[in-house]
Amino acid sequence: MKILRTPADLKAALQAHSGTIGFVPTMGALHSGHRALIAAARQENDIVVVSIFVNPTQFLAGEDLDAYPRRIEADEKICELSGVDYLFYPEVSQMYGRDEVTVCAPDVRGYILEGTSRPGHFSGVLTVVNKLLNIVAPDRAYFGKKDAQQLMLIETMVNNLFMRVEIVPCETVRDDDGLALSSRNAYLSPEEREEALKIPRALKRATKLVMQGVTRSDRIVAEMTAVLEPLEVEYAVVVDRRFAPAEHVEIGNTIILVEALVGTTRLLDNVWI
Ligand code: AMP
């Protein structure tokens, strides 16, 4: 595995290859969720590129940019053992200059749900993903369904800007107790972690209701809200795959999403129905 620190070096290295390129962008502190994306990329491509970049433009003032877990040595080992060919690990100054052109998230779908509490977050995400896709020029790029709104907005960007990469959605990987893996789980105290389990429990409850034939979104949301108590719930919603609010669950076209604060840690999770 080669570790490259500049866009020019990575571009030059990749130009020497003729096979397909699979790309997994991350912010590091890698866990089994990231490893599942890397494994999918490894299976479907000749070359696998992983990036680790804690992107400052997707953090709002006062968020956890400085505190975000950084574990580059462990991450290098995980990448090496996962069969990654190139690890791209740039400095901020390699990715951003002054007076930049940026990508704007769509006015509506970039500013609902997670975009409500984090206005501008998704513009930062799309800007950095656009840059990374231009540097790597992959055939396929792998993203987790756990960040469903992010995935939908990246797919929208790729369509709207006529980009030629294939976006591959990957299933959410969970711990044995059901909690979706996230680099931010490292912030949770043991008690908070216990509280956080209400999130996957609420989604399980929702899934069970759907399996029992309940389709009304208001009923499902009410039951989820009861399970989530006393967490501070930012949203618990039923949307269609385009993120329009849905009054009824429609099998194959619904996502049920939850975002809740556990202590000061904001956790997201969802199920695709
Ligand atoms: P992050 O490093 O948190 O920015 O995540 C990098 C990629 O890994 C994103 O596409 C995430 O959606 C994905 N990811 C994060 N957590 C999980 C998980 N538990 N299961 C599957 N994919 C995940």
Image (cartoon, grey):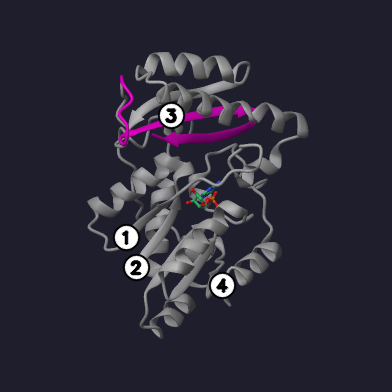
Q: Depth-wise, is mark 2 or mark 3 nearer the camera?
A: 2
> How far apart are the alpha carbons under marks 4 and 1?
21 Å
Q: Is residue 262 located in the magenta-colored stretch of the structure?
A: yes
Q: Quadrant of residue 264?
A: top right
Q: Depth-wise, is mark 4 or mark 1 nearer the camera?
A: 4
Amino acid marked by disc 4: Gly
Q: Is residue 96 located in the magenta-colored stretch of the structure?
A: no
Please report the bounds of the magenta region as a residue range: 247-273
Q: Secondary structure at mark 4?
A: loop
- Secondary structure of the magenta portion, mostly? strand
Which comes sooner in the sequence, label 2 or label 1? 2
Which residue is found at the position 56% from the left and 67% from the top? 89
Give me the disc on residue 116.
Answer: 3
Give me the disc on residue 83.
Answer: 4
Which comes sooner in the sequence, label 4 or label 1? 4
In the rendered image of this protein, does residue 12 appear above or below residue 148? below
- Dots 2, 1 in contact, CB < 8 A: yes
Residue at numbered disc 1 = 166
Q: Quadrant of residue 214?
A: top left
> How far apart are the alpha carbons under marks 2 and 4?
18 Å
> How far apart are the alpha carbons under marks 2 and 3?
32 Å
Amino acid marked by disc 2: Asp
Give me the disc on residue 139.
Answer: 2
Q: Nearer the viewer, residue 129 or 242?
A: 242
| Percent coordinates x, y for residue 113 in the rendering | 42, 30
- Dots 3, 4 in contact, CB < 8 A: no
Q: Secondary structure at mark 2?
A: loop
Give the residue furthest to the right.
Answer: 190
Circle 4 packing at 10 Å, graded few (<14), some (14-19), many (20+), is some
